[in-house]
């Protein structure tokens, strides 16, 4: 029989034991994710009963020879550590900082190291579809494991097969529910059609269409070389006199979006909006998105876009509540699938 304290019942005791399963929770963040990490910490402190939770103290220094030095300014011995670091620009600096920080946590005897990486780079390099090329997504998984990570969390991998590159447990989450819920509440669905920006996004496009209960169409495009911007060829489906919601997972230069918007407008689409998860927006992307005169551009904060760079038609949705809920459930050994009725 479980021992029960005088001030509580057996369930309270079991919950407390569960919370200590991997040691006391501790959050740290990398230099690429301070805004999101603080949102996550605030959400957990205010909504999950961890009132004293804060971001752990650490310092990151880049020397004149471009070597990165990381120091923890507090002990993590015996702690269940969640390290939040997205792969924003400069990507390779942030990747090295991440790996070095994980090594520091391991050498300070953290009980468990959980990497929370909202945007994982190199996920488009997930297969060997040409001679003499690497599978860099697999290399990323290997480096993360070798550094000492015990568990990972990420959002909207480019393809589901990347989960198989990891030999450690992880939570491959999606921002789909956050984005689709926003569209449900704020869009007129009566004349809307969802358009997947390419056939590779067909499955996710179907999820969008089924959830919103609207028709689905596709942009057919072909990549003729290894450059970033393939050429849109045609539209599969009916978008004439319809309002269009383009959907994708990631935007870098927005070249594909330009082609997709032009393609749907050429066949008579009315208002065009655009929803996606990861806003890895280069300078040219802002110029291109501005020139398209889209009704609304909706994305998440897996990558930080400063307020001064946002266009007037941009809506940024936070993934902090999602990540906070998953962190707490992982810490307490509870099901993550319950969040999505799985």
Image (cartoon, rainbow, N blue to C red):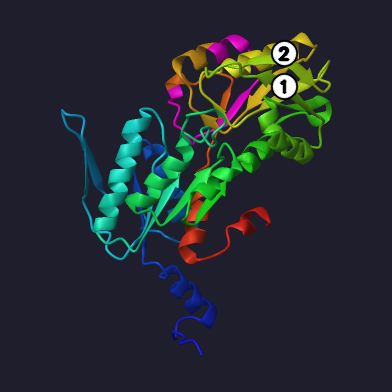
Look at the image and tell me in which quarter the C terminus lies.
bottom right
Callout 2: few (<14), some (14-19), or many (20+) C-alpha neighbours within 10 Å?
some
Q: Circle 1 is placed at which residue position?
A: 219
Q: Residue sitting at 25 percent across and 46 percent down?
A: 58
Q: Confirm whether the magenta stretch covers residue 306.
A: yes
Q: Is residue 56 left or right of residue 179?
A: left
Look at 28% across and 54% down and name the residue there: 105
Which residue corresponds to mark 2?
263
Q: Secondary structure at mark 1?
A: strand
| Image location (x, y in percent) of residue 187 | 73, 29
User: Which of the 4 quarters of the picture holds residue 182?
Assistant: top right
Q: SS of the residue at dot 2?
A: helix
Can residue 39 be seen here? no
Q: Nearer the viewer, residue 89 or 242?
A: 89
Residue at 49% x, 57% y: name it.
Answer: 169
Task: Work out whether residue 170 or residue 241 is closer to the camera in this orientation and state it.
Answer: 170
Q: Is 232 rendered above or below residue 204? A: above
Residue 97 at what x, y percent from top left?
30, 39
């Amino acid at each position: 029989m479980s021992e029960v304290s005088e001030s509580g019942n057996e369930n309270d005791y079991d919950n407390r034991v569960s919370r200590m399963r991997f040691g006391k929770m501790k959050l740290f963040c990398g230099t690429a994710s301070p805004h999101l990490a603080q949102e996550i910490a605030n959400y957990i402190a205010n909504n999950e009963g961890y009132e004293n939770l804060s971001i752990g103290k650490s310092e990151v220094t880049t020397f004149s020879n471009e070597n990165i030095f990381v120091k923890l300014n507090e002990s993590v011995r015996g702690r269940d550590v969640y390290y939040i670091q997205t792969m924003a620009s400069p990507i390779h600096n942030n990747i090295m900082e991440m790996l070095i920080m994980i090594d520091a946590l391991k050498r300070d005897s953290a009980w468990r190291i959980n990497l929370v990486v909202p945007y994982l780079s190199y996920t488009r390099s997930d297969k060997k579809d040409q001679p003499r090329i690497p599978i860099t997504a697999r290399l990323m998984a290997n480096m993360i494991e070798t550094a000492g990570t015990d568990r990972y969390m990420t959002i909207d991998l480019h393809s589901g097969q990347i989960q198989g590159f990891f030999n450690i447990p992880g939570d491959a989450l999606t921002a789909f529910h956050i984005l689709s819920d926003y569209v449900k509440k704020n869009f007129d669905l009566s004349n809307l059609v969802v358009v997947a920006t390419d056939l590779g996004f067909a499955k996710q496009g179907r999820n969008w269409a089924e959830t919103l209960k609207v028709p689905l169409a596709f942009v057919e495009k072909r990549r003729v070389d290894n450059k970033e911007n393939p050429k849109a060829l045609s539209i599969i489906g009916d978008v004439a006199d319809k309002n269009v919601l383009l959907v994708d997972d990631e935007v870098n230069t927005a070249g594909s979006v330009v082609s997709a918007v032009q393609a749907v407008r050429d066949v008579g689409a009315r208002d065009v909006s655009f929803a996606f998860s990861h806003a890895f927006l280069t300078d040219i992307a802002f110029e291109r998105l501005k020139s398209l005169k889209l009704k609304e551009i909706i994305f998440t904060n897996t990558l930080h876009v400063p307020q001064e760079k946002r266009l007037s038609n941009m809506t940024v949705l936070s993934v902090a509540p999602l990540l906070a809920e998953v962190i707490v459930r992982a810490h307490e050994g509870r099901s993550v699938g319950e969040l999505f009725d799985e």
